[in-house]
Image (tube, coloured by chain):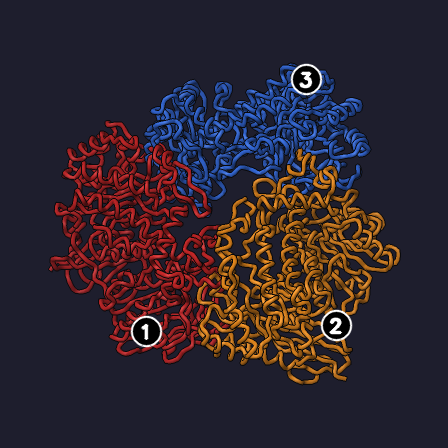
Chain colours: A orange, B red, C blue
Amino acid sequence: MIDPRQKVVWYGGEYYPEQWDEETFKKDLEWMKQARMDIVTVGVFCWSLIQPEEDRYDFTYLDRTLEIFEKEGFYVCLATPTAAPPLWMVRKYPDILAVDMNGHRKTPGGRANFCPNSEKYREFSVKIAEKLAERYKDYKPLVLWHVNNEYSNYCYCETCAEKFREWLKSRYKTLEEFNQAWYADFWGQRVYDWQEIPIPTTRNFLMFRKDRFQSTNPAAYQDYRRFMNESLLECFQLEYLAIKKHTPNVPVTTNIMATFKPLDYFEWAKRMDIVSWDSYPDYGEDHAKVSMRHALVRGLAGGRAFVLMEQSPSQAIWKWYNHQKSEEALRLHTFQSLAHGAEAALYFQIRQSRGGCERFHGAVITHADSNETRVFGAVKRVGEELKKLQDRVLNTRVLSRVAVLFDWNSWWALEDSPGPNIDFTYLQELEKYYRALLRWGVGVDVVSVEEDFNKYKVIFGPALFMVDKKTAEKIESYVRSGGVFVATTMSGISDEDNLVWLGGYLAGLNEVFGVRIEEFDAFPPNEERTVEFLNKKYSVKLLEALVKVEKAETLGWYVDGLYTNRACITSNKYAKGVAYYVGACASQQLANDFVAYLVSKHDLERFCREPIDGIEIVQKEKNTGGKLLFILNFDKVGKRVDIGGGSWRDLLSGKIFRGEISIGPEDVLVLEESD
Amino acid sequence: MIDPRQKVVWYGGEYYPEQWDEETFKKDLEWMKQARMDIVTVGVFCWSLIQPEEDRYDFTYLDRTLEIFEKEGFYVCLATPTAAPPLWMVRKYPDILAVDMNGHRKTPGGRANFCPNSEKYREFSVKIAEKLAERYKDYKPLVLWHVNNEYSNYCYCETCAEKFREWLKSRYKTLEEFNQAWYADFWGQRVYDWQEIPIPTTRNFLMFRKDRFQSTNPAAYQDYRRFMNESLLECFQLEYLAIKKHTPNVPVTTNIMATFKPLDYFEWAKRMDIVSWDSYPDYGEDHAKVSMRHALVRGLAGGRAFVLMEQSPSQAIWKWYNHQKSEEALRLHTFQSLAHGAEAALYFQIRQSRGGCERFHGAVITHADSNETRVFGAVKRVGEELKKLQDRVLNTRVLSRVAVLFDWNSWWALEDSPGPNIDFTYLQELEKYYRALLRWGVGVDVVSVEEDFNKYKVIFGPALFMVDKKTAEKIESYVRSGGVFVATTMSGISDEDNLVWLGGYLAGLNEVFGVRIEEFDAFPPNEERTVEFLNKKYSVKLLEALVKVEKAETLGWYVDGLYTNRACITSNKYAKGVAYYVGACASQQLANDFVAYLVSKHDLERFCREPIDGIEIVQKEKNTGGKLLFILNFDKVGKRVDIGGGSWRDLLSGKIFRGEISIGPEDVLVLEESD
Amino acid sequence: MIDPRQKVVWYGGEYYPEQWDEETFKKDLEWMKQARMDIVTVGVFCWSLIQPEEDRYDFTYLDRTLEIFEKEGFYVCLATPTAAPPLWMVRKYPDILAVDMNGHRKTPGGRANFCPNSEKYREFSVKIAEKLAERYKDYKPLVLWHVNNEYSNYCYCETCAEKFREWLKSRYKTLEEFNQAWYADFWGQRVYDWQEIPIPTTRNFLMFRKDRFQSTNPAAYQDYRRFMNESLLECFQLEYLAIKKHTPNVPVTTNIMATFKPLDYFEWAKRMDIVSWDSYPDYGEDHAKVSMRHALVRGLAGGRAFVLMEQSPSQAIWKWYNHQKSEEALRLHTFQSLAHGAEAALYFQIRQSRGGCERFHGAVITHADSNETRVFGAVKRVGEELKKLQDRVLNTRVLSRVAVLFDWNSWWALEDSPGPNIDFTYLQELEKYYRALLRWGVGVDVVSVEEDFNKYKVIFGPALFMVDKKTAEKIESYVRSGGVFVATTMSGISDEDNLVWLGGYLAGLNEVFGVRIEEFDAFPPNEERTVEFLNKKYSVKLLEALVKVEKAETLGWYVDGLYTNRACITSNKYAKGVAYYVGACASQQLANDFVAYLVSKHDLERFCREPIDGIEIVQKEKNTGGKLLFILNFDKVGKRVDIGGGSWRDLLSGKIFRGEISIGPEDVLVLEESD
């Protein structure tokens, strides 16, 4: 629950009164109520409006806006406007603008264009945050602070370079340590003075290859990412502290972007009171990928309620081809977020802008300026359904016995340096196994390596590239005491300094897995290799490991390619547990059948007797006891699902369900145990 | 007619004596005469030759060149050399060099590399233009001034930024107006001082997406384009005025490039005495696209004679694959230009260079250094045929009752900001309808929104994205008084500030069209949707509008996709006229059949009873009365065309034609009414 | 022979003790010996280690390393470390860092990042080279100096610009000469002061088109390449001279990259005591392309022994998809290098790094840290086989009567300026004819235009674009006195100033060829044209010449396209010789059959009665008399080869072969005449 006053899943969106006359504003308030909205985000980009000069503030606009929303009975999520510094500010203090990786300073006029280490920026942003907190600390409708907006901007300026060197000094203490960690003697890069250390730029360390920036020194960009992640997080924290001084009881968030590579959100989540995120699934995007992002956000939130801060009711703007969203898709996306823990669902934005970059971005009230549009109808229908749920889905939790490890350090380390195969991606490797589990209705958490492993029966560490000693020991101890651990292609390659583990990869856990990984063959997407697993043949792609079996049992073999007749998939009993290794980048079919084998072998709790594609089933437990079942059918054909013995009531239709039930195409059921 | 002395269509090309010894020059003059040439362009890039130092001029080369051409009886088109400032000049005044949109100043050594707002550049260019005019004002063969060459270069330097701000100030008067027009509160970009306004660069406003630069602020790049268009036009005008001081009676032109996005040639045409253009059709390019460019130039010239200033007799240089031009293609291209109003046809260039960027560009006299080449033969044949025409094609006009609106502001606004579909292009949308009309031999003008609408029975405004209030009223009044207006996908989206019209797009003309456009669904080129129009099914592409019918009659429906069973093509009787709307991006087939419907419904004057592909027929009327008929067969098979009752004489063969006639493959007839 | 002490083909690789502790080092020495290695390269990137400050040197590391290698009985190839200047150095003297063609200085942290004209860089690099030579002049195992590493880096800084102008002055003497050579009047680029001359940059002269940088002034980039080639070569020579002062008898090399476009290695080879190169064939790359690179290196070495300085035992790192190398491929690649003259074969590298850019690059001892890996086994097997050869393959020579001319100036001139077809590449045109010859087992040299032509019966000059007067005369005289010369598409286009030859291309040799080349039609890869040659039809691609036959005999005709029924392939008897012209870019099939025609017509010495694909046969003659036959089967199926009457002993298996013999799939025979 976001606020003690919360009685239903909140519904609303971002509104920008500064773009409209008051008459339009009032009409929109009526229409928002028609759509059953109760919460609004304001202020996201109002900095230039409320601070027209360095020493002058003018809150007229915000005062009036907040007054109206209060009068009309809306809850308010109030934003600090620090994502877009005013033009006067960047003109006066040009160092506020970030420098790109080519070494060129941005020119004014964008957003998220500030240097996170600019002292001036930090000073100004903290000040405006505090001003807002001070002014509106007694504003009743205020239920959430929204700091900045989609932090994202790395900077490569001289200030950052200086602070990076300090950061390195504090991380490595001595130059000897540093030179070792950065493997400085390779290509003769030994550092004798901290000042000599260059930052990664496109003119030394970074190459643009295909769609990736890759670092010629794997240690360098890894550390720069860590540093930039911290730099931006510091910006958030400084505003957080300024706000908390005045409103210690109002939760503070910033809207994150889930599987967003530049920021390690596990670090961020620790610093937020409530996690909120912006979900922009692609048209026709596989629901399992969207689900994994929700599960990741759930993991970030530690299972507590989160906020769907932004979604589009219809169209995007930044894609080449911006499909409209069907009414069914909007409904499914919204309920999918609830299934994973969203207790508020907001749109970007309420009213479509007439100008600016995003004028063609979808909005609840479109350019047609009407409440009789297709989009408004769809939004309103969802609003009405949310009200039917009353408070029944609040304060519920997904309970899972299976986890997939998500690790930003591995993501960076795997993809940011020239590796064996440029097309092998971190996310795809994770999604593949997540998708295979989803088909069974198995509850899956997506968590960090810092999570308590002992909560889980099975843990997947797909492509868990970077494994430090502590994590290696944690895995060993988990398996020793009965856990089941699955490692795959490119798991366990490097230590925390991004130096490769010797002796057969797998982070020194060769005993645990009973194998040594000797090398990886790589091939392009248009080539394939074949693996036999439990008497069936499967294709594998991009990468395959040469697995030297020492004690493990071999479950799968290569039947062609350079490693013909050698092991590919192995299982090793280690003390009370089992460690699996999948040496090749599996096709989805192989991942599915491998997971099916695990499900049966380790008798995982699952919802389906047979896997069902196109369906997502999320079982939840209420804090107060009792169970909920979200059944989402993403398919365009109806499905049958066996929900077992009990009797369940659909909170949307009021109907009672039991046994093998039908769910219509692209339909949603929110079932509550009713006996 | 370009000059009172003109008795035939002039024929010639650019010649660069500075590249050759006098013996070669003389041989070339002979060969030019063999090819029946009578006009030559000189001086295009001779600046460094005639002004070797800031204060020293040396006209020896030009004096001698002009003397020889006079002696040999050629007319002369004399160029100002200002497209390529001398190296000494850009070394001495580096600010003359333009800055690119990345913020980097060009380095010396190219052409069209000057900053159009550089005071030094303007000073020098006006001075050299005046020097030339003064010196050669009594040179008899002089029939045309050719200022600069293919103006094209936008600049992003500090001088330009300063002048841009002044330009904005003079356009918007107050900051309040400016902030509103630029929709400044979006992303918090409110301006409190004109000096704060940034220019669009790749580091703030411009993103390179696919093959386009798109602006994150639609207003910003639109205004920058307007400003740059004016800046370059000022350069032209300054030279124009300097020349006119000394040769008030010699017409002045600059060679434009027709459908060239950066420059709004409707503004330019107003300032030129004669319009001239460079035509470089692609190998195998659809003749309708080339025809539309000619028709546009005709529109720019207000129907008066224009000059085909450059075409290649054979090969281009800048393409990846530079096909040779067949003899037939050369002949067709030349006569096509005559059909639309060219009264002089020149080549770039007469003799192929031994060095320089364009050494492999085709020329009349090739590296083979012979008058017995394939190319020379083809050029000579055209020369001989032009002489056969005598003065019969001079002073003739195409009379059209149909117009297609061409609008640079719409082109920019549609393509330069992130819109729903990046592949939807302005030119293709226009060409599609132009092509559909061409098949019927319907006379079509391509004109600006400033044209007198009442001349036309039917006006097409395909993708006429930007429609200001005045134009909207003009359309309304046109339809009210009996006109037929066709709007299509993405017509009427924004006002002159590039702010979106509210209430259903179509520039507030919902009454006129009887529909409201609610939204556009977008999809990639490999997806298609289907529309039923008059009981036949057609595919539509990229974009489809959700059309809410209020009073219109529905002619076409979506039969699949998100808008199944909703209207796509509508017709609305409004007062005495009719307004059509085609909501989806039609396939050529649909455009063809829609146009066929209009042709029949509104009984448009056309030449063909049934549409014929591959043929272009242009009917012209002589100033002195009497008619001409250009029939061009671009197809590799012969065709039959019914030219009706009268009797016509082919000016090329002398043969008489009447009734249903035959035209050979890739052949040309120039028929004159002979009764 | 590299050194008088050499008794066998040396085997080894690069080792970097600075990356490992001494225990690992010692283990590695054992494993190297197991793999039968006897030579090691050290010091390639140790600059920052041995010169920690400007005035301090510390050779501890190198002393110890060399001591150990000596003790363990290895020969040593000692590198100067100048490819990677220390970080302290580039911080102190930032001008050492090169500037890229966008005009941006590199930032520290890479390799090959120095400006070759930096005085400081030259001073430091000469000094460290001399220090090393002085210190280790009496080091017994030292058999080869390895200067720098893969020179490659062009620079575009102000220092280079200055020196370029001096270079131009010394080349052209007068501005008049310069302006003529650079064709300065094109686009008005006349130079009045040497200081005005701009260097080619991406902001004036260079355009990035497709995958090429093309210069808008063909003369400019051609000269800049010549200048840069000389600048880098000067760096090499300066180190060379410093070394030679102390060790006049130890040969000096630098590792080149064969068909590497930026450097004209024919100039380099003249300055090296021994040629060495790095061979990184692509996975599955056609063996003929690899063979041509070896033959080129053989040509560079003037037929003397060369060194295979680097190859990967397995995987590369810089490709998108880094395939592993099979054991068979490694063996074939190694023996192929021997066939062409390698007398030492080294790996990059012995032990795989834990960090740095190339941590996933293959190595003899992999991350698995074991001598029982697949890779180690493959390396060891090759080592054992090399020892079986004893000294039998040393001091042998390939004797060829056929040559293919390789010319960097033509490569640059053809590809670096906008030409008729951007996809027509220099290397492919050469490889095509080389491949066609290889199938017959014809001995082919790949040599420069400076080679003595009279050694050859037939010379191919495919796409020999740039032909100066001297070379033209040499070709004429060669044919006159009985030689057979083959020119193809784009041969003989420009003179040494890159100015086009007039009068029908072919460098004014129209008499010799009996034809004039009038023009080239160009078309994209997805179009094709057809040529009939000796009653068979063949496709031709990309370019076709319009050949005007004057005296030649026509062997092939176009049967479609613009030049239907005109000549394409001609043969002309000229005095005692014959000159062939192949006007179109032939398909491999046409090249094969054209070569087959020549083989038979001119009765070329060849090994095969019928051509065999997939096999490479190299015949060698020992200095001491006697013959060797390398037969390499790159195919995955066995082949039969007729080796004729004599009796031959396989040095690997000891077996005797005669007559028609079998060779297994991917197998190698090294046969020695045994009677």
Residue A7 occupies quadrant = bottom right
Q: Chain of mark 1?
A: B
Q: Is residue C618 left or right of residue B605?
A: right
**Image height of B445 relative to C228, above or below:** below
Do residues under tags 2 and 3 come within 8 Å of each other at their CB atoms? Answer: no
Q: Are marks 2 and 3 on the same chain?
A: no
Q: Can you give x and y, in whole percent of width and height, for residue C235 in the image?
A: 56, 24
Q: Is residue A540 left or right of residue B139?
A: right
B497, C552: nearer the viewer: B497
Residue at 30% x, 75% y is: B578
Question: For mark 2, does the 10 Å Cα neighbourhood hold few (<14), some (14 to 19), or many (20 or more) residues?
Answer: many
Residue with the most extreme right position: A575
* Amino acid under disc 3: Glu
Question: For mark 1, does the 10 Å Cα neighbourhood hold few (<14), some (14 to 19), or many (20 or more) residues?
Answer: many
Say which residue label 2 marks.
Answer: A607
Secondary element under disc 3, as helix, strand or loop, is helix
The tag on residue B579 is 1
Q: Are marks 1 and 3 on the same chain?
A: no
